[in-house]
Image: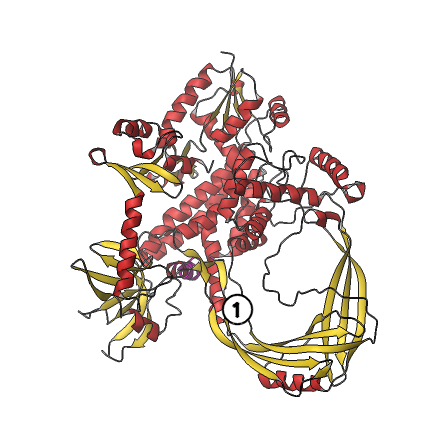
Amino acid sequence: MGENLVIVESPAKAKTIGKFLGNDYIVKSSFGHIRDLAKKNLGIDIENGFKPKYVVSPDKKKIVTELKSLAKEASIVWLASDEDREGEAIAWHLFDTLKLDPAKTRRIVFHEITKDAILNAIKNPRDIDINLVNAQQARRVLDRLVGFELSPVLWRKIKPKLSAGRVQSAALKLIVDKERDILKFKSKPYYKVDGYFIPEGTKTKVKSSLDKKFNTKEEAQNFLEKCQNSIFNIAGIDTKEATKYPAPPFTTSSLQQEAARKCGFSVSQTMSIAQKLYEEGRITYMRTDSTNLSKLALGTTKEYITNTFGPEYSKTRQYQTHSKGAQEAHEAIRPTFVNVEEIEGNGAEKRLYDLIRKRTIASQMAEAKVEKTKITIGGSSFSEKFHAQAEQIIFDGFLKVYIESNDDDNNEDDETTLLPILSDKQKMIGSEISATEKYTLHPARYTEASLVKKMEELGIGRPSTYAPTISTIIKREYVTKASKMGEPRDVSILKLSFDNGIANPSIEEKTKRETVGSEKGKLCPEDIGMAVSDYLSDHFDYIVDYNFTANVEESFDKIAAGKLVWNSSISDFYTPFHKKIEGALEDTNHVDTSRVLGVDPKTGKQVLARIGKFGPLVQLGLPDDKEKQFASLPKGVLIETITLDDALELFKLPRNLGQFEDKDVIVNNGRFGPYVRHNNKFVSIGKDNDPFTIDLPTAIQLILDYREKEIKKHIKEFPEEGIEILNGRYGPYIKQAKKNYKIPKGKVAEDLTLDECLEIISQPKESVTKRKKKSKK
């Protein structure tokens, strides 16, 4: 007796906290939740107030046994899981499962892992907040009820092995609705006119844009003809001073968005890196919707700014949180020590830390003062005006440290140019005026970051749910993260040139090939995702209704505040929901996902597109036709958009290219893209080859390259134990069955013996597979 046992969620957090506490403390990790709802028979006793049935996870039984033993010997058990609802639930589950004595159990919380924060938490313990626990239980129970009861309906109506979730379904609907808007969109051409002028008495060329866009080439041509005989001058100069204000410190949502823009990180990648930074004591807790900073943080940041940049750069601010349903009482995400400019770690960790630090510092800096100048250029033979604008920084303020990015990367009108000193009525000498054909762009698909922003605006989910929600709908293949190539088009450019201010008598016309509408890293719905969303919208509209989802989140907030009884709230939802489920199961009609495309002119058979057992496909022939032909839809092609000609082209596959080593070489389109099959081996043909035109020599080279790669991949093998030593993306590793094991430093893969491999495998902490699962918490 006498030792203190501190229990946290993750090994990294335990290691960091252990540095701050003396020998009287043992710090152990629970590796996240130690128990969850039973998977069998729903795991919820509906008849008795929706009482959850919890079971210890099989992989946590050893941990629970160890923690029970240590808890019996400890004088005090400190439950130090995170401060949010999830963390509170983990603490409660530990208390209940380990059968802890209330008299010697303390709950402590902190939002940063520093020595002062830990010691202060130990001085100020509290009881487990059962209201927070109940809010988390309500979320878990409701999500289990929705998933457990709704998924079988989808199996029967659409396709086996589908699943639905409350927050995921609302997020999926956002993506599907956006896609429908895009499908309805009709792109229209227009002409944008840009003018280049030289102010009289200077050599500076000023770029400007006309305030009118023309619908046709004839209109644009007519305008340029007017410019041929025009005298240009400045019709107005507007100069004014403007103030720019810094963005607030990061919340979970704004960090995910800005890390995507500035660093190219996915939402889940951002959260994974932030989790590591938090556990190492580099930043404050990363799941928060608060923009507040503590008095200590405000003071240290002010001191740093004053000492580094000067007192004129410092301005202390406390921001208000405006997100719908903001709940958590944490601080914003900030560095624990603002004066630490650089940290140890990999490149991604350094970049995210730098982003968080600079944003925090900038939020406490003075506003920037800029002078904005807008000039208007007119012509003697037309009423339209050209506009040019410039911006000059008078005082950089927070811009010295940080500039916030935005989602609009296609704003072609947001151009500024450096202007010389100009005066009203000053003559402008023409240099070049061009009219370029453009096309209106369809609404932009969501990126992960812009979807998080939209979810936050609508109150769908909370900081802890954004990343797992997006990961889930991608994992279920309802949505893919893809890049769209865009459509190649010939665009017309009309150009009027000037020689010493005198316009050429003819207007030059040329054509340029451009790709219109390309997108990168956007969330695109798959056919199965659209089918699921459509069915839910038609039959369970409130499940995907944005207001309903937001209202559910508000009810969780009320439960957390002790203003609502959690199982009563669940009951209000479940009774009408269950009746709907029963009605849906009684209806034996299957959802028809097929779309008739037309008739094959060669065979006279009907061609249709539909969802099959292994995904979307096109079918030649009716269901009762004995000689039907099938072809998988390529990635990115939807049932709603494929044409008859596209479908007929797909039926040209598979193609037999000939023989290699007395075996047929077949090219075909599969679930994961086009491939070559030879001797029961499947080789991707890559992005540079077309399955309809690839020839036999190219296919053979792909097969040979694949073999060489496979030879390099296999280092060693012990078939009697089913062990392989392979070369992977991150270096050599050991594989047995479906598990991968990291080779310890100092060991050479080629020299490993069977006994050494078995010894490495026997150490579960070295399992790559397990480490990935545990890294979440």
Q: Please name the residue that numbered disc 1 is placed on.
A: 442
Q: Secondary structure at mark 1?
A: loop
| Color theme of the render | secondary structure
The three-letter code of the residue at mark 1 reads His
In the image, residue 563 lies at what x, y percent? 58, 40
Q: Quadrant of residue 244?
A: bottom right
Residue ID at (43%, 35%): 774
**In front here: 508 or 517?**
508
Q: Which residues are magenta?
A: 532-542
| Residue occupying the point 52% across, 74% down | 187
Residue 122 position by quadrant: top right
Q: For residue 565, say whether it is visible.
A: no
- Measuring from the top left, give residue 639's x and y in whole percent: 37, 67
Residue extending furthest left? 662
**Can residue 661 be seen?**
yes
The stretch drawn in magenta includes residue 759: no
Q: Residue 36 at what x, y percent from top left?
A: 41, 35
Horizontal relation, residue 722 to residue 370: left or right? left
Q: Is residue 132 left or right of residue 41?
A: right
